[in-house]
Image: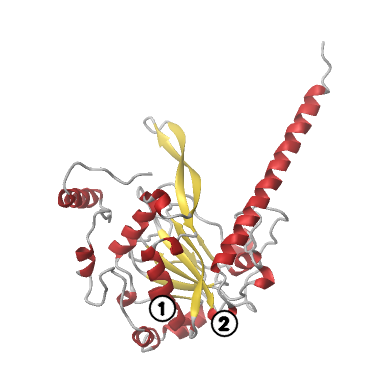
Amino acid sequence: MEGPQSDNSDSDSIDSDEALYEMLGVKGISLNETVTDLESTSKNHSCSGIPQLEPREIDKIVNGPNQLGKLYRNEAICLLPRELSIPSKLMRRITDELVYGGSKYPSDRSYEIIKFISNGDTQICERRELTRFENFVDNHDGWHELCHGYLARCISAICGEEMILYKEKLNLKPPGGSGFAPHLDSPSLRIALGDEGPSTFVTIMIAIDDMTEKNGCLKVCKGPWSEDNHVEVVEPEEDGNPDAGGRAGAIELNVADKLTFQPITCKGGDIAIFNGWAPHRSSANASPFPRRAVFLTYNPAREGDFHEFYYRKMKQKRDDYKIVLMAQRNADHEAEMAALNSIPRA
């Protein structure tokens, strides 16, 4: 897929883009944004726009008067202060580079059928839209520096030990895009590697666009959640879809209804951290604009580096499921043909 094309000069393109975004009431960014623009966002940012804070500086902000480490342990989630946020322009730029970069930045992509009303609000139509990226961090210099560098330092300060990246997903959530049902992360994250992989997971969420209840923000049930203190979850289907029914960690709706999920509303570039046992969910995007956010899961370095191994195993599980699905479809077709052949002919 190619990015936006224009016959205008770079400066004209930037001006017209910004005017359009302002008219629509949304925050946007031109793919032609210069490094100079990002340098001006903060004196504490490098030329790439990534905050240049040393571990001791981050630790002072996290574990000083804010006591965010303690808050995280008590509530299983915390929102980092704005001084630790990522410039929203940077987040939008590196997201656009993935979306429009095509094969330049290899990744695993997922699509969703979006329903919308057309022809004067009288006809429901469908369209297939790109909704998720996975396994992209190590194929893009900006994402690599951000996730393995600055964000790893932030989450290490919160957890009190060195943390390394386990997996990543970037959700685009276009208008009409579905939310996700209530669930826990840790049970599903353990399925891929089992006893071969880590057992402790913590996730960083970075808002790319402002997150509101209308556009389907993250909702979390706060509490001292842990492996020894978590809500009951559903057993996954045997040989099920590893991205749906075959996943562990789903919470029955009658259990979820007894929990209080609090919306995490925040600005683009803001950072939230929650552990793998915190119940969370989101609603569909009921706004006319995308709600993009990236979710980066880390595990303690002492448990090992499994990033590449995780995606290799997940590919194998997805391929195995496709084989099971194809076999089931063939069996259904053969049964249907047998039934048709048994009908007496005149």
Instruction: Please say whether residue 183 is visible from this viewpoint.
Output: no
Quadrant position of the C terminus in the picture? top right
Looking at the image, residue 286 lies above or below residue 46? above
SS for dot 2: helix
Where residue 326 sits, quadrant-wise, is: top right
Give x and y (percent) for residue 325.
Answer: 68, 44
In the image, 134 versus 80, the foreground residue is 134
Give the residue pinned by disc 1.
154
Where residue 81 sits, quadrant-wise, is: bottom left
Give the residue type at disc 2: Arg
Which residue is painted at 65% across and 56% down in the image?
317
Give the residue type at disc 1: Cys
Within 10 Å of the Cα at label 1, are there few (<14), some (14-19), or many (20+) other Cα atoms? many
Sooner in the amino-acid sequence: mark 1 or mark 2: 1
Quadrant position of the N terminus in the picture? top left
SS for dot 1: helix
Q: Is residue 327 left or right of residue 258?
A: right
Which residue is painted at 61% across and 54% down in the image?
244
Give x and y (percent) for residue 304.
Answer: 58, 77
Looking at the image, residue 228 lies above or below residue 64? above
Within 10 Å of the Cα at label 2, are there few (<14), some (14-19), or many (20+) other Cα atoms? few
In the image, 255 versus 271, the foreground residue is 271
Q: Is residue 22 left or right of residue 80?
A: left
Give x and y (percent) for residue 173.
Answer: 43, 52
Residue 302 numbered mark, or none:
2
Residue 45 numbered mark, or none:
none
Give x and y (percent) for residue 5.
Answer: 26, 43
